[in-house]
């Protein structure tokens, strides 16, 4: 009893120090995230010719508008607006706001923005061609559109697994399934593979349902994006594939066999290994 009481006292006395440690760790992670976010914003700014004095729209902004605030405060944009289906309208400061909105149909006037940019969002937009037309409409002549998006549906982990069950996150980062399983396998086969990884049956069912039925992805392949962008009114300044450090985890000795099988199963499609796409587009000047 005395030992148990001493342990409780020790825990009580140590808890403030644990809280300090947690706070310091959280602050460290926040600082590291801020450096990464600022580097991304600076990269986009440079690729678009800078933000100073311009009206900028972020497609898929977060509720706190972290990128938007950097754009107006650090890069001197005239105004920064963010649109997302998962945010509520909020004014972050006088020239910076986020708003609920569907990029396929907005209330912005024609020729409203100098720059539109987005990251890891285009793969979630259904009727992407319609959204791209809307982006063109609201962009000023000579304006720039930048996006990097992925994983695209045609890549090895294009199922974009990203769900939770029982408080646990299951993503394509921590659940490594066979490459192109969403294109080459049946749901019951994928579920069996999840079970073999020690994932409980209910979670495995949710993961499998997400992979094959989720509406989170638009299911456009790399070649689909290329076709839609080339058919748009935009001038293409840059359009290229990109890979990530995750790719090697999904590379197996069946690379050639899978590639041949995929091309036979999906006639007219060639690229099944580009993990994402970067584009830089310009609306022609009047």
Image (tube, rainbow, N blue to C red):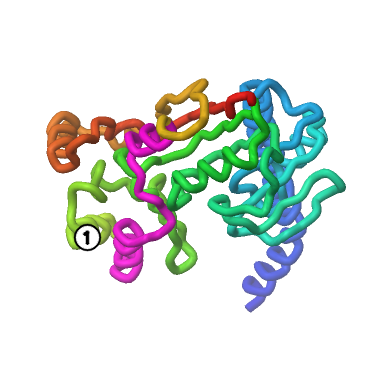
Q: How many marks?
A: 1
Foreground: 170 or 256? 256
Foreground: 225 or 25? 225
Q: Residue at x 79, y 45 (%)?
A: 96
Quadrant including the C terminus: top right
Q: From the viewer's perspective, is 209 left or right of 257? A: right
Foreground: 57 or 185? 57
Is-magenta flag for residue 243? no
Q: Is residue 72 above or below residue 19?
A: above
Image coordinates for residue 4, horizontal then vertical, percent = 63, 73
Task: Write down the quadrant of residue 5 in the picture.
Answer: bottom right
Foreground: 80 or 230? 230
Quadrant including the N terminus: bottom right
Q: Residue at x 54, y 28 (%)?
A: 281
Q: Residue furthest front?
A: 286
Q: Residues within 10 Å of mark 1 (few under 14, many from 20)?
A: some
Q: Where is mark 1, residue-wise?
A: 187
Span colored in magenta: 200-229
Task: Write down the quadrant of residue 142 in the picture.
Answer: top right
Q: From the viewer's perspective, is 230 left or right of 261? A: right
Q: Is residue 20 visible?
A: yes
Image coordinates for residue 229, horizontal then vertical, percent = 44, 33
Image coordinates for residue 72, horizontal then vertical, percent = 79, 36
Mark 1, secondary structure of its residue: helix
Is-magenta flag for residue 204? yes
């Amino acid at each position: 009893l005395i030992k148990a009481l001493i342990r409780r006292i020790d825990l009580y006395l140590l808890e403030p120090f644990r809280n300090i440690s947690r706070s310091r760790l959280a602050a460290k992670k926040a600082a590291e995230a801020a450096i990464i976010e600022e580097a991304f914003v600076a990269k986009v700014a440079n690729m678009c010719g800078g933000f100073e004095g311009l009206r900028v729209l972020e497609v898929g902004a977060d509720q706190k508008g972290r990128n938007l605030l950097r754009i107006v405060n650090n890069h001197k944009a005239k105004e920064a607006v963010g649109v997302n289906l998962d945010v509520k309208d909020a004014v972050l400061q006088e020239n910076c706001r986020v708003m609920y909105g569907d990029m396929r149909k907005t209330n912005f006037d024609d020729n409203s923005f100098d720059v539109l940019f987005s990251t890891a969002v285009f793969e979630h937009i259904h009727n992407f061609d319609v959204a791209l037309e809307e982006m063109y409409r609201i962009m000023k002549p000579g304006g720039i559109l930048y996006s990097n998006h992925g994983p695209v549906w045609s890549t090895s982990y294009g199922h974009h697994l990203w769900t939770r069950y029982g408080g646990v996150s299951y993503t394509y980062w921590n659940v490594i399934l066979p490459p192109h399983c969403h294109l080459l396998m049946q749901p019951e086969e994928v579920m069996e593979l999840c079970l073999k990884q020690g994932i409980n049956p209910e979670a495995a069912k949710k993961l499998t349902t997400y992979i094959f039925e989720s509406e989170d992805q638009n299911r456009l392949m790399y070649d689909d994006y290329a076709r839609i962008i080339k058919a748009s009114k935009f001038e293409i300044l840059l359009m290229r594939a990109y890979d990530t450090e995750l790719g090697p985890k999904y590379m197996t000795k069946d690379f050639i066999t899978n590639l041949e099988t995929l091309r036979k199963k999906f006639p007219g499609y060639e690229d099944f290994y580009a993990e994402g796409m970067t584009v830089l587009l310009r609306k022609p000047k009047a």
